[in-house]
Image (cartoon, rainbow, N blue to C red):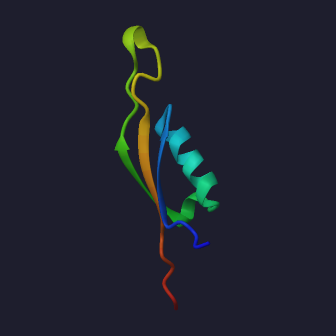
Amino acid sequence: MTPKLSVEIEGKTVAEAVKRALRELRVPRDRVKIEVLSEEEKGLFGMPGAKPAKVRVSLIKKENT
């Protein structure tokens, strides 16, 4: 099975989505590029979860030196 190079993950917040993506890729934060595809939006009367945050997390390719 080949390792994933990037994932798109949703979460209640951007931070939660990033945390889930890092767990799925099994890498530390300093080895990835993070793109915020959409911010979370609060629901009616400030209730969370109306629209989840979505991020794309991609592995950074290491350069051979």
Q: Quadrant of the N terminus?
A: bottom right
Determine whether 58 is above or below 47 in the image: below
Q: Quadrant of residue 33?
A: bottom left
Q: In the displayed orientation, state which residue is furthest to the front.
A: 1
Nearest the eye: 1 or 46:
1
| Left or right, 18 with reference to 37 | right
Residue located at (58% from left, 46% from top) = 19
- Residue 13 is situated, as x and y percent measured from the top left of the image, at 49, 34
What's the residue at 55%, 39% (across, down)?
Answer: 16
Q: How far across and down, in percent of the image, does residue 60 sit? A: 48, 70
Task: Report the residue that reaches farthest toward the bottom.
Answer: 65
Q: Nearer the viewer, residue 50 or 2?
A: 2
Q: Is residue 58 above or below residue 23?
A: below
Q: Tell me which corner region of the image, top left, top right, bottom left or bottom right, holds residue 43.
A: top left
| Residue at the (46%, 23%) spot, across then down | 49
In the rendering, at what x and y percent does residue 14 appear? 47, 39
Which residue sits furthest top?
Answer: 45
Q: Quadrant of residue 54?
A: top left
Number of labels in the image equals 0
**Up-down relation of residue 33 to residue 44 (above or below):** below
Residue 22: x and y in percent read 59, 54
